[in-house]
Image (tube, rainbow, N blue to C red):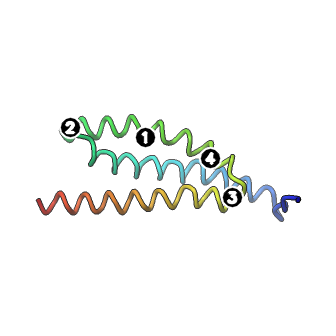
């Protein structure tokens, strides 16, 4: 079984680099927002703790991008969890605003 090679390897590599830099940053940012709502601390401490922990999310995200079987799978592996965390953060924000 052979793995099909992309038509333009430079485009595939560029897509992965873009996914690692932009997608990884977006995932880490959304994770930081989501986690800041969940940490049991005052807002400044929760934001600081979530921001510090987001560095531990960014590194595996970059590794995932280059370990994925395809650039499409790499993008999906970043965008789907990011979208889910974004929706949960929005729900937590709306729930907190109503209380």
Marks 1/3 in contact by CB < 8 Å: the verdict is no
Q: Is residue 45 above or below residue 10?
A: above
**Percent from the top left, x then y, of residue 3?**
84, 59
Image point 83% across, 65% down: which residue?
Answer: 7
**Foreground mark, 3 or 2?**
2
- Position of residue 82 measured from the top left corner of the image (x, y, whole percent): 46, 57
Q: Mark 2 or mark 4: which comes first in sequence?
A: 2
Give the residue at x 69% y 58%: 71
Cα separation, mark 1 vs mark 3, equals 23 Å
**For the residue carrying disc 1, how many other residues have a C-alpha within 10 Å: few (<14), some (14-19), or many (20+)?**
many
Labels 3 and 2 touching (C-beta < 8 A): no
Judging depth in this view, the residue of 84 and 30 nearest the camera is 84
- Residue 33 relative to residue 2: left or right: left
Of the image marks 4 and 1, the number of the one nearer the N terminus: 1
- Where is mark 2, residue-wise? 41
- Tag 2 and tag 4, C-beta contact below 8 Å: no
Please state which of residues 29 and 40 is positioned toward the viewer in this rendering.
40
The circle drawn on residue 91 is: none
Q: Secondary structure at mark 1?
A: helix
Residue labelled with disc 4: 64
Among all residues in the image, which is located at the extreme front? 1
The residue that label 1 is drawn on is 54
Q: Is residue 23 left or right of residue 32?
A: right
On the rendered structure, is 73 left or right of 50?
right
The residues tagged by marks 2 and 1 sit, at their Cα atoms, a distance apart of: 17 Å
- Can you tell which mark lies on residue 71? 3
Of the two numbered discs 1 and 3 on the same chain, state the one appearing first in sequence: 1
Task: Please identify, in this view, whether the residue under mark 4 or under mark 3 is nearer the observer.
Answer: 4
Give the quadrant of residue 86.
Answer: bottom left
Q: CA distance from mark 3 to mark 2?
A: 38 Å
């Amino acid at each position: 079984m052979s793995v099909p090679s992309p038509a333009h390897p430079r485009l595939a590599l560029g897509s992965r680099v873009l996914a690692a830099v932009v997608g990884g940053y977006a995932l880490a940012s959304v994770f930081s927002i989501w986690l800041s709502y969940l940490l049991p601390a005052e807002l400044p401490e929760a934001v600081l703790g979530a921001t510090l922990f987001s560095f531990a999310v960014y590194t595996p995200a970059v590794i995932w991008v280059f370990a994925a079987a395809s650039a499409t799978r790499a993008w999906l592996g970043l965008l789907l969890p990011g979208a889910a965390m974004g929706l949960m953060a929005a729900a937590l924000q709306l729930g907190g605003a109503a209380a």
